[in-house]
Amino acid sequence: MTSHFYIAWAGNKRREMGEINRFVNLNGIETVVEPFCGSAAFAFHTWKASPHLRVHLNDKCPHLYAMLSTIKRGDKQTLYDGLQRYANVTKEDYMRYNREVNGGEGDDLTTKWMLMQTYNGLRPGMPPAPGRPFPKLKPLQGAFPFDDMLERATLTNHDFRVVCDQYRNDPTAFLFIDPPYVNSCNDFYSDATCVDDVDAFYTYLLDLLQNATCKVMLVVNNALLMRLLFKDYIRHRYGKKYECTKRQTEHIIITNYDVE
Ligand SMILES: C[S@@+](CC[C@H](N)C(=O)[O-])C[C@H]1O[C@@H](n2cnc3c(N)ncnc32)[C@H](O)[C@@H]1O
């Protein structure tokens, strides 16, 4: 379980907050925005330390949005009851649900997506290892600090560019940008939320760094393409081991503002 969030979330930034926080500058900031929120580890930890901040969470994934909207309106029990119906899922069921969620067709897709996320958080893109039983689903946690943030937060379901455009000329906004990584395993996102047009995606992000008047922090994998593209804005790099695959990698922190 991704302990700050309701379900397991591969690639969440919770364990990287120590590295990230060293380069965050919230002077003059009133709103924290996560255009690719996922489990919103950054917004959550930042808001917990500074609860006066407004929070805007956005993600293009329709199932994540549906889950968070349901929790936001206080109906967590419905989600939990829905998950219970799938408590005894077999490997064949799991593979079929995966196809349904990625194909966007079938019943009860948000619940099936939650199921996939929970298992994928343990072993990305794969069913449980042969001969190993499916782990039991953990219930969505009860009263939870994340609920408090969510209750107050603005929640949207747009392409990230819509949200970045909304804040790019607002110097009181801090945009934390954690996109799906290029040349990396994104199997744990549904197909609809993978990087479809790399050129347009990263050209937009470079322009944002060059021209926005809000504060922007971007975290990406330390790939040659990223180093070339963002060379003027790289502040730090750090090692990271994926909890689920144990694969070692490096991330880089990029900002459009000076850090001491
Ligand atoms: C690396 S994850 C973010 C993880 C997050 N920082 C956390 O702590 O859990 C990237 C997220 O971007 C979302 N996404 C992918 N393409 C998007 C787009 N074009 N606009 C908005 N969100 C998108 C995915 O659904 C996924 O949740």
Image (cartoon, grey):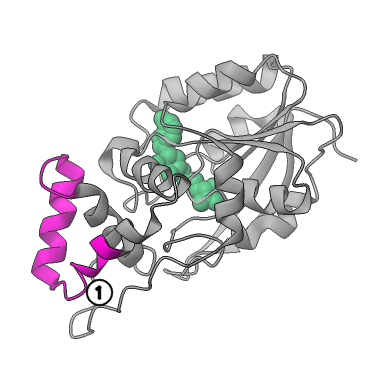
- Left/right placement of residue 112 relative to residue 91 reads right
- Residue 78 lies in magenta, yes or no? no
State the residue position of label 1. 128
Label count reads 1
Residue at x 57%, y 55% (from the top left corner): 146
Up the image or down, 73 lies above or below 154; here it is below
- Left/right placement of residue 66 relative to residue 173 reads left
- Which contiguous range is marked in magenta? 81-108
Taking the image as drawn, is residue 203 in sight?
no
- Residue density around tag 1, few if under 14, some if 14–19, many if 20 or more, within 10 Å: some
Residue at x 54%, y 64% (from the top left corner): 143
Residue extending furthest toward the right: 260
Could you say which quadrant of the image residue 205 lies in? top right
Name the magenta segment's main secondary structure. helix
Taking the image as drawn, is residue 15 in sight?
yes
Q: Where is residue 192 in the image (x, y as percent from the top left)?
A: 28, 36
Residue at x 47%, y 67% (from the top left corner): 141
Residue at x 8%, y 67% (from the top left corner): 92
Residue extending furthest toward the front: 74
Three-letter amino acid code at disc 1? Answer: Pro
- Residue 90 lies in magenta, yes or no? yes
Q: Where is residue 201 in the image (x, y as percent from the top left)?
A: 45, 25
Nearer the observer, 39 or 19:
39
Assign a secondary structure to mark 1. loop
Up the image or down, 21 lies above or below 95; here it is above
The answer as to whether callout 1 falls within 8 Å of ligand 1 is no
Ligand 1 occupies quarter: top left
Question: What quarter of the picture does the C terminus occupy?
Answer: top right
Nearer the observer, 127 or 158:
158
Q: Position of residue 228 (x, y in %)?
A: 60, 31
Q: Where is residue 105 in the image (x, y as percent from the top left)?
A: 11, 41
